[in-house]
Image (tube, rainbow, N blue to C red):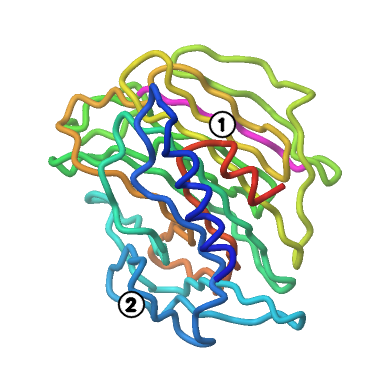
Amino acid sequence: MKKLVYLFLILCVFTSGTSYSKGRSPWNFFEDFENENVGRLRTNKFTTNNKGTGRKPFEIKVDPDGNQYLSVTVKDGYNVDRKGRTKEFTERAEFQPFPKKALGKEIWISFRKRLPEDFTHIDDRVLFFQFKNTMHYDGPNGPLIGLRYYENGERLKIGGDTGGNDRKMSRQKEDKYRIESKYKNYEGNWVQRWEKFRSQYKDRDVDGTAKVTPLGEWSTYKIGIYNTRDNDGFVRVYKDGELMFDYNGVTYDWRGQYYQTHVRIGIYRDRVVGVSYPDQTIHFDDFIVVSDEKTLDSYIK
């Protein structure tokens, strides 16, 4: 409760007598799950990207030191979603504040994440965060920024789509304007392999590294976004204080009519018919969304 009161006071200070060139985030909250009852998530402050299981995958649990956190689990067959007309599917258990209008806004996001000691990686995509703009026409647009594991957890991809033609049902890469960076686990460090910002490629940055967090330990992600059609947009991703992704330029260039924006944490993984993946659980805590980096840093320093 003290954290919530403190956040309210900070927001009052930052909104009084201060002028902003960018629009403020439509979300402003700090959720540490301490006011939730242990067991299935009951709060009405958030919603799920539900395809059938409702809040079943979401539980409030407690560490031995008394810290409460959100546990998210996906199982074989959970929330199956068809990918076009192929034989591929996805399975998901995603959690989010209610979607809002966020075009032209500056948004800063943070959360803590932990892979339990018994976590099993899979040789496929496992996305655990996404910031996604959607259009009135439900086209094949991907998130502006997503964090994903590949290849049994040995690869980490940060990136997404800044725009394209959302009315084209083709998922060909040339129909989208991608920004992404790929990392490889090399001796316990995330070492950048390459990055692509729209049409330009860049060789790997040997300084662009961060530690690979061992199973059972917490890591902290910090994400800054200016969601705009203008050239002064940006997307920045930090892991445990290390800058891993830094894009500057247009962040919204879809041709369809803008509808709303989603900020999601959880598990969203690929599934191939005939292949049964193991249960996967990820822990989340201290989920924060605010309007400026200074406010966010006051919580995660």
At label 1, which amino acid type do we have?
Arg
Q: In which image quadrant can residue 55 be found?
A: bottom left
Residue most toward the front? 17
Q: Nearer the viewer, mark 2 or mark 1?
A: 1
User: For residue 183: magenta?
Assistant: yes
Quadrant, the N terminus: bottom right
Is 153 in the magenta?
no
The span shown in magenta is 177-185
Front-most of 29 and 221? 29
Residue placed under numbered mark 1 in the picture = 236
Name the residue located 66 percent from the left edge and 33 percent from the top edge: 244
- Callout 2 secondary element: loop
**Residue 126, x across and y down, in percent:** 52, 55
At 42% from the left and 32% from the top, the residue drawn is: 17
Q: Residue at x 74, y 71 (%)?
A: 117
In front: 173, or 299? 299
Q: Is residue 141 above or below residue 178?
A: below
Residue 67 falls left or right of residue 159 = right
